[in-house]
Image (tube, coloured by chain):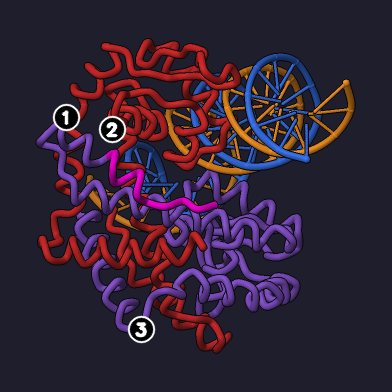
Chain colours: A purple, B red, C orange, D blue
Amino acid sequence: MTSSFAPTERRLAVTCERYPAFPREPAVLVRLVKHIYKVVHDDANATLKPYGVNHPEYNLLMMMYGTPGGEMTPSDLADAAGEKSANITRLTNQLCEKGLIHRKGSNDDRRKVVLTLTAGGEALIESFLPEICGLLGRQTDKLGVDDQHQLERLLKKMLDGLTD
Amino acid sequence: MTSSFAPTERRLAVTCERYPAFPREPAVLVRLVKHIYKVVHDDANATLKPYGVNHPEYNLLMMMYGTPGGEMTPSDLADAAGEKSANITRLTNQLCEKGLIHRKGSNDDRRKVVLTLTAGGEALIESFLPEICGLLGRQTDKLGVDDQHQLERLLKKMLDGLTD
DNA sequence: AATAAATATTACATAACTAAACTATATCGG
DNA sequence: CCGATATAGTTTAGTTATGTAATATTTATT
């Protein structure tokens, strides 16, 4: 799966020739992000498949794992994971059916629903985390520590500009 | 839509506390890419909607626009756009129905299919490109020229490590 | 000639998005 | 306190998108 970026760059060059106003640099960045996201997403799905969860479900689980107290409402999850609320209902249903999370009504605001990880959910997370850590490590293999910090800084700057 | 990254960082900190082997820096990078991709993708879809094409269709059109000679096979497109071949058939069907591309059998290898942009396809591309250029510009607004080049370099390095 | 590999399509199953309707609760202005 | 309005979450239906696996056809290999 040698998805070299070179052909994409050649196409951008041709595009700029045909349409000189086309901003090469921003387009390169956007296409790079797209390429990287795709590979990362596919890798994660492949790694998670044996554990019976897909990437969106993994994201929800990790959001809950990383929340102090471990309680989140569906709205919290929607914000955190960038999913639509209709999706959250579907995904949390799946996680409930698998026994990974637990759903109960909130006491202080009875419109709300509180989701928590079950013991089984935490156990599953901690069973796939070793592999996930390995994957994350491999995915940033080529980058030195300085590179990683630079990249973090620049991506944050870019994200900042997007959410205005 | 203030999708600040701060909550995500707090969750990563908690995750690292609970599971010390968790590699914070790689995880930050992956989550940043995911956030950025999502916003970029949604923005592009919104911009393209009035033109009757979605993001994947736009990608295919731009791949063809940027290909010298303008001829591509479905396999070429699948590689270039990172789509599954079954998807390519569906997407190119849609583009054919809209009269934006043309499909014909290849002469030298009769397994192959050759796709070309129609005049209408090129016209549509050049009608939405002004808006797309504006969007691309805004999406990288916050980054100076040096930042953009640094970011390009680092993303390429990361992508390199992914496709081993 | 037989077998394997490549190309594209098809059919089926899953997943996701959208928009609206619905339940229940909370909040605010009078 | 009352009634209007807003919020939280779910549900439904319809549409669109994506992924998987099998198939037909043509070309390559041995």
Figure quadrant of residue B133: top left
A9 within the magenta span: yes
- Bounds of the magenta segment: A1-11
Sequence order check, earlier mark of 3 and 1: 1
User: For this view, does A112 lie left or right of residue B7?
Assistant: right
Quadrant showing the C terminus of chain A: bottom left
Taking depth in this image into account, of A124 and B100 the one nearest to the observer is: B100
Chain letter of the residue carrying label 3: A
Disc ID at residue B66 = 2
Q: Position of residue B78 (x, y in %)?
A: 49, 36
Chain letter of the residue carrying label 1: A
| Distance CA(mark 2)–CA(mark 3) | 36 Å
* Amino acid at the residue labelled 3: Val
Same chain check for tags 3 and 1: yes
User: For this view, does A161 lie left or right of residue B24?
Assistant: left
Residue positioned 64% across, 78% down in the render: A130
**Mark 1 packing: few (<14 Cα in 10 Å), some, or many (20+)?**
few
| Distance CA(mark 2)–CA(mark 1) | 8 Å
Query: Mark 2–mark 1 contact, CB under 8 Å?
Result: yes
User: For this view, does B52 lie left or right of residue D8?
Assistant: left
